[in-house]
Image: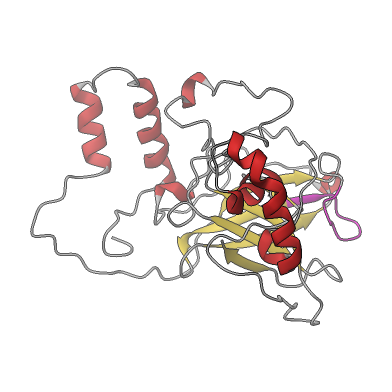
Amino acid sequence: MVDGVNPALSPAEVRLERQIRAASHGRSLTPQEQETLERIRPPRKLPLKVAVQPHEGSIAMLPVAQLYARDVPDLPAPEGADLLQVLWCPFDHPIMPRTELVWRSAATITDVLTTPPEPPAMQFDSYLPEPCLLHPEQVTEYPDHLELSAELREQIRQWSVPQAAEEHMDPCVYYDCVLSSAPGWKVGGWPAWDSTDPSPQPCSECGTGMEFLLTIATFEEGDDAGRSWSPYENPAAEPSPDLHHFALEQPTAVQIGRGYRQQLSICPAAPNHPHIELMT
């Protein structure tokens, strides 16, 4: 046990579990599949007695995202870098994984590991991202209503009444859900504020106001009630046959908290300064 409740699974065990779930989609598990799943996650016996065993020492981090400046024109890379690699420790610190931002020059990467090191265990299987290809699409966003003046919020509410009625939505939430901030994983843009209010975030090194860099989201279109943010290229795309046990709105299999987002912000004066993590 890692946190006293959840079994500590290795990345290999999580991948095997996902493969079995995908292969058995639409049918009953075979005895061998059931035995394998019970080996990975032994049935709990009551009364349950557990002991918290905090992890000690260093472990390998898991890759979360790899972004090239050529694909993301607004990527705020420091001078000499054109590649951002985002890694995280698959344990809560204290309520979400701790991330590491690595800025690199793609031209200097010559020796690529075919089998990168992995941690021996993870706190949650939802901290193992499922590999996904990126198809970047630039969109126009607007600030969350909490970042607007009271007068402008009232104007937007009045303007949203007929549009919200068509979508059977409350005018007070129509703007945030359909127009202001795109759901899902994204670089830049405006952050959404669901579980916390916006507040100044100065750089711990130089005091410069931090700028929004990346959203690591649980859902891609889970909040898109009006589907205004559906991908332009192929909005009706089907998931990979090997991954059809994952919902279209959760292709990465990542879950932050109980379905929140992890938002990363960096210092615009020096992207290598310590970044900020927020759960929203």
Residue 75 belongs to the span the image colors magenta: yes
Q: Measured along the vertical axis of the image, is residue 117 above or below residue 191?
A: above
Residue that appears at 74% across and 57% down: 155
Location of the N terminus by quadrant is bottom left
Return the residue nearer the eye: 261 or 221.
Answer: 221
Residue that appears at 42% across and 28% down: 245
Return the residue nearer the eye: 257 or 106.
Answer: 257
Using the rendered view, name the quadrant where residue 78 is placed.
bottom right
Q: Measured along the vertical axis of the image, is residue 7 above or below residue 140?
A: below
Q: Is residue 110 left or right of residue 63?
A: right
Residue that appears at 46% across and 70% down: 94
Q: Measured along the vertical axis of the image, is residue 167 above or below residue 68?
A: above
Q: Main structural element of the magenta stretch: helix, strand or loop?
A: loop
Q: Position of residue 200 (x, y in %)?
A: 71, 76
Farthest left residue in view? 47
Q: Is residue 44 left or right of residue 110?
A: left
Residue 61 belongs to the span the image colors magenta: no
Location of the C terminus by quadrant is bottom right
Q: How is the image coloured?
A: secondary structure
Mark yes or no: residue 105 visible. yes
Mark yes or no: residue 226 visible. no
Q: Position of residue 12 (x, y in %)?
A: 41, 40
Q: Position of residue 225 (x, y in %)?
A: 56, 39
Specify start and end residues of the magenta stretch as a single range.
74-84
Farthest right residue in view? 79
Q: Position of residue 100 (x, y in %)?
A: 64, 62
Q: Is residue 82 left or right of residue 168?
A: right
Residue that appears at 50% across and 46% down: 254
Return the residue nearer the eye: 216 or 189.
Answer: 189
Using the rendered view, name the quadrant where residue 88 is placed.
bottom right
Q: Is residue 160 left or right of residue 6?
A: right
Q: Measured along the vertical axis of the image, is residue 42 above or below residue 26?
A: below
